[in-house]
Image (tube, grey):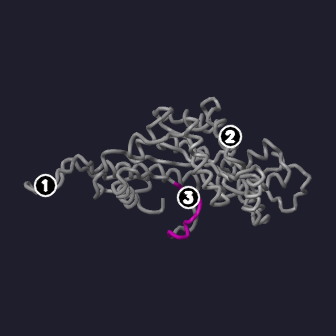
Amino acid sequence: MFVPPFMLARQIMSLHWLSNGRAGWNIVTALDGHENFGLPAMPSSEERYARAAEYTEVVRLLWQSFPEESLKRNRESECYADPSQIRSLNHTGSQFSVKGPLNLPAFGRAPIPLVQAGASEVGRNFASSIADAIFAATPDVEAATDLRRDLRQRAEGHGRRADDIRLLPGLSLYLAPTRKEAEELFAFTHARGDRNRKFAHILKLTGLDLADWPEDRRITAADLPSELPAGASKTHAELLRRVIVREEPLLPDLLGRPEVIGSGHWQIVGTVDDAVQEISAWADAGAGAIDGFITTPGGSSGSMALALEALMPRLSDAGLLREDYAGSTFAEHFREK
């Protein structure tokens, strides 16, 4: 959200043309980076999402301002495009002033899908109003089910269909031929994780200082500060608080959670059989947990090879993944069942 909407609209539409309709836009409101763009501090979450809402509106209007149908490409009449079909925006809002139109025609054969990752209250409201897909941090099936149900209800509240929005949780895979090898891979990958950095991460998200916490004392909801620290990611803070409230973990258990060592994503450590079984369970959770997933095989090239060469074919055989695509554009892939 740091670059002007006109520039981003042109960049993504250019990529859409170059890829024959396979571009998408992941709308990120950012948690930091302001120092690189002349800002003294990051705006609040509410301010960032208000800016994102207007930014998205402007970009979509720019994409519509120069329709592909206006292109005539008539050499005899020396008419490249019909100017009567090209519209200025003359947009003046609280965040942006953009005249338009975009100086690049739209790729008219397929729209550009929008992806978002908002999971806080304001983030969910924004995501459900515009996104085709939600990239979500859902460490367990209950979190995924609750988030998907809420987003679908909110989408209907915005005048959309519930099926217009799809939940795609991040899935971190540590795969090996045996569970023991997978567990060793996971342990090796995180062996260099600094304990003090984990404490700092928890403190930044929740305000709870665990540096001198006894390892045999449980961490409970009563230990959590009532207010989140300034600048904390509400999404990740709520995931971490949820673990503490529900499980009252001991310190070693909390330090090993994906909400602490990663980004709170769904995590599978095991064999291909284990992964097939767990993914099937999530997909079958009353048809209400997920619409797909975005996988990030971790730990080794062997884990990635197992994910691509063994897991994906198994999921396809089980009817959980498509074997092929009927269309050729990103938007068509989303519409396919």
| Residue range corresponding to the magenta coloring | 28-37
Q: Where is residue 15 in the image (x, y as percent from the top left)?
A: 38, 57
Q: Which of marks 3 and 2 is in front?
A: 2
Q: Is mark 2 on a helix, strand or loop?
A: helix
Q: Is mark 3 on a helix, strand or loop?
A: loop
**Cα distance in 3D space between marks 3 and 2:** 32 Å
Depth order, front residue of 237/272: 272
Q: Which amino acid type corresponds to the residue marked 1 in the rendered image?
A: Cys
Upstream in the sequence, badge 1 or badge 2?
Answer: 1
**CB atoms of marks 3 and 2 within 8 Å:** no
Q: From the viewer's perspective, is 286 left or right of 333?
A: right
Upstream in the sequence, badge 1 or badge 3?
Answer: 3
Label placed on residue 30: 3
The residue lying furthest to the left in this view is 76
Q: Position of residue 228 (x, y in %)?
A: 71, 53
**Is residue 221 a member of the stretch shown in magenta?**
no
Q: Mark 1 points at which residue?
A: 79
Q: What element carries label 1?
A: strand
Q: Which amino acid type corresponds to the residue marked 3 in the rendered image?
A: Ala
Q: Which amino acid type corresponds to the residue marked 2 in the rendered image?
A: Glu
Q: Nearer the viewer, mark 1 or mark 2?
A: 2
Q: Position of residue 167 (x, y in %)?
A: 56, 41
